[in-house]
Image (tube, helix red, strand yellow):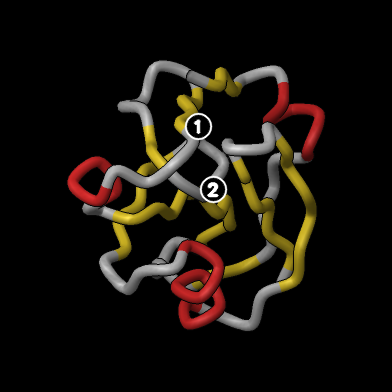
Amino acid sequence: MKALLISPEIKKIEEIEIAGEQDIIHLIGFDTLESDSIGNNGDRLYFDEECFLRGTAGRFQVDKLIPVSGSGVLVGTSDDGSLQDVVTDIDGLRSRIKYL
């Protein structure tokens, strides 16, 4: 499924393909996943729940959500919580993200 990978240490957003949660864990680098809803289209931002405890490099913030340290993966979710293609496009996300 289509997802967006946010790499704040190099200030880059790229479209990627993932198969599921295990790919998100691999991309983020930790299995302590947390997620926040981004808008009202079902997209969720996945990130390392312990990112600030670990001192991970690179920080970013989407809209007015709490800042995230380290990589993030934006992916769509259905009403039942299963993962699906992301709705937000790169340009739309780029206009909503702030690197810290």
Quick one: SS at disc 1?
loop
Q: Determine whether 53 is above or below 15 in the image.
A: above
Q: Where does residue 17 sit, x and y in percent of width and height?
A: 75, 71
Category of crowding for the residue at label 2, using alpha-carbon neighbours closer than 10 angstroms: few (below 14), some (14–19), many (at least 20): many
Please state if 9 lies on the left or on the right of 48 as rendered. right
In front here: 26 or 35?
26
Kind of element beneath mark 2: strand
Q: Which mark is residue 39?
A: 1
User: In the rendered structure, are the residues bearing label 2 and label 1 in contact, judged by CB atoms less than 8 Å apart?
Assistant: yes
Give whichever of 23, 85 is nearer the camera: 23
Q: Bin the neighbour count of mark 1 within 10 Å (Cα to Cα): few under 14, some 14-19, many 20 and up.
A: few
Residue flagged by tag 1: what amino acid is it?
Gly
Q: Is residue 50 left or right of residue 12?
A: left
Quadrant where the N terminus sits is bottom right
Q: Residue shown at 68%/37% (left/top)?
A: 10
In the rendering, at what x and y percent does residue 67 appear? 36, 28
Whole-Å distance between the Cαs marked 2 and 1?
7 Å
Residue at 67% in and 75% down: 18
75 lies left or right of 79: right
Task: Give the residue type that dot 2 points to.
Answer: Asp
Residue labelled with disc 2: 43
Mark number for residue 69? none
Question: Which residue sits at x=56%, y=78%?
Answer: 23
As drawn, which residue projects farthest toward the left? Answer: 53
Residue 32: give x, y in percent of width and height. 26, 66
